[in-house]
Image: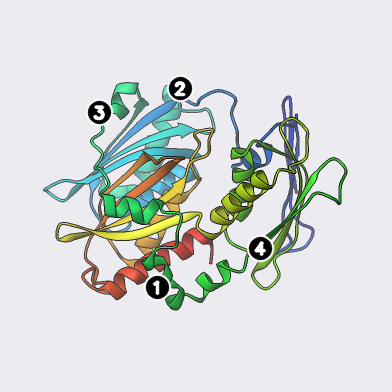
């Protein structure tokens, strides 16, 4: 089966011949720096998308936040910002700032259909659902909590933290991540630099490689991605600088390899910290220089917490600037769980490990 969209460009999606065979996505379009990264995100737009505000008021229950998130994904709506609050009477108020990948929300009927779908998903727990175009004042009025210095250091440091190091003894998958290697060859091709990457096979690893290349303003002329073998895969890229020249400067090669290793080893930062008597889960990822965040992070984290039976009292998505880059930070104030008592350091480590494993696809 093949699905094609024809406009100025062409996207062809073809199913594998045998069950279990990979699908083939063919994209025919003008070349540009960062094209591969945009393809990994499925959709790229030349103009800034409209921002909509979804307000969901409902009765609280376990897994509710993920169910709303899943419904938004089914509607092909991307979550840009969120503010989730549990009210004193046990009700939930969710404010989602979303963009529309189907271009349907600009009509009253499209917005009504989206609210109707959410009402069906939430069932008797739904009290009200409103969806409207968000003005700049809507986002600016959100009261986001500030990050403590300790949490910021834990999330944004380039060095492996003590908490992350302790996870290596808990999860064998963490040991595999450190097996990656990068080789630069300027002699094989007269016009291109060959980048040979060996890395662990994890979710979005190709996106992380291409995102980093895009941030360095590197043009990819040819790429080959090998099938996964025993949890590892090879990626070969023929690359050039934006001016069409090879990357021969040692400093440029070292900087690129260093950032690529960081992107492959620690694409997601996960930690738990105290917030008064409660525990708060933090997840951070780098934002592309274009301003785009990583897809489906909120979905994966809320899915994991639902599977663990952990309630979320409040949640936020915000941006944070460090000296050299911008980060997207997800915060979840967690409720106590019988299986995962949050006062236990072992339980907290297990939660962090489970969230990381879901994000990495292990």
Tell me which label, 2 or 1, sits earlier in the chain: 2
Where's residue 231, x and y in %? 64, 70
User: Is residue 40 visible to the viewer in this orientation of the structure?
Assistant: no
Q: Residue furthest left?
A: 88
User: Residue at the spot x=35%, y=60% of the render?
Assistant: 271
Where's residue 333, x and y in %? 25, 54
Q: How far apart are marks 1 and 4 (CA)?
A: 23 Å
Q: Are marks 2 and 3 in contact (CB under 8 Å)?
A: no
Q: How far apart are marks 1 and 3 (CA)?
A: 39 Å
Q: Are marks 1 and 4 in contact (CB under 8 Å)?
A: no
Q: Is residue 69 left or right of residue 229?
A: left
Residue beneath label 2, please?
A: 107
User: Residue at the spot x=58%, y=56% of the render?
Assistant: 261
Q: Is residue 88 left or right of residue 80?
A: left
Q: Measured along the vertical axis of the image, is residue 64 above or below residue 82?
A: below
Q: How far apart are marks 2 and 4 (CA)?
A: 50 Å
For mark 1, give the secondary structure: helix
Tell me which label, 2 or 3, sits earlier in the chain: 2
Based on the displayed image, in which of its 4 quarters is residue 44 positioned?
top right
User: Is residue 329 visible to the viewer in this orientation of the structure?
Assistant: yes
Residue beneath label 1, please?
A: 166
Residue beneath label 3, please?
A: 141
Judge by depth and name the residue closer to the eye, 169 or 261.
261
Q: In this view, does 316 lie to the left or right of 219?
A: left
Where's residue 274, x and y in %? 22, 59
Tell me which label, 2 or 4, sits earlier in the chain: 2
For mark 2, give the secondary structure: loop
Residue beneath label 4, please?
A: 181
Judge by depth and name the residue closer to the eye, 115 or 82.
82
């Amino acid at each position: 089966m093949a699905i094609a969209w024809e406009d100025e460009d062409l996207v062809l999606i073809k199913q594998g011949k045998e069950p279990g065979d990979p699908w083939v996505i063919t994209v025919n379009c003008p070349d540009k720096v960062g094209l591969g990264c945009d393809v990994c995100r499925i959709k790229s737009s030349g103009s800034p998308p409209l921002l909509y505000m979804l307000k969901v008021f409902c009765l609280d229950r376990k897994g509710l936040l993920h169910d709303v998130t899943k419904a938004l994904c089914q509607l092909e709506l991307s979550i840009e910002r969120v503010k989730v609050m549990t009210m004193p009477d046990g009700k939930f108020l969710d404010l989602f700032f979303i963009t529309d990948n189907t271009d349907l929300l600009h009509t009253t009927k499209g917005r009504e259909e989206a609210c109707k779908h959410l009402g069906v998903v939430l069932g008797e727990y739904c009290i009200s659902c409103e969806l409207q175009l968000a003005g700049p004042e809507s986002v600016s009025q959100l009261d986001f909590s500030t990050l403590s210095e300790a949490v910021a250091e834990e999330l944004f440091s380039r060095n492996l933290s003590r908490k992350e190091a302790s996870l290596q003894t808990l999860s064998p998958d963490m040991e595999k991540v450190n097996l990656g290697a990068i080789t630069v060859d300027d002699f094989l091709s007269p016009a291109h630099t060959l980048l040979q990457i060996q890395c662990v096979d994890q979710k979005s690893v190709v996106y992380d490689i291409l995102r980093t290349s895009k941030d360095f303003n590197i043009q990819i002329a040819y790429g080959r991605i090998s099938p996964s073998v025993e949890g590892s895969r090879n990626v070969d890229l023929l690359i050039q600088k934006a001016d069409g020249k090879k990357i021969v400067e040692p400093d440029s090669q070292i900087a690129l390899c260093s950032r690529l290793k960081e992107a492959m080893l620690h694409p997601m930062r996960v930690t738990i910290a105290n917030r008064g008597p409660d525990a708060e889960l933090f997840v951070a990822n780098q934002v592309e220089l274009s301003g785009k965040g990583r897809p489906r992070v909120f979905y994966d984290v809320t899915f994991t917490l639902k599977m663990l039976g952990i309630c979320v009292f409040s949640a936020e998505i915000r941006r944070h600037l460090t000296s050299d880059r911008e980060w997207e930070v997800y915060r979840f104030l967690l409720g106590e769980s019988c299986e995962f008592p949050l006062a236990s350091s072992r339980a907290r480590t297990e939660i962090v490990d489970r969230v990381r494993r879901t994000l990495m696809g292990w």
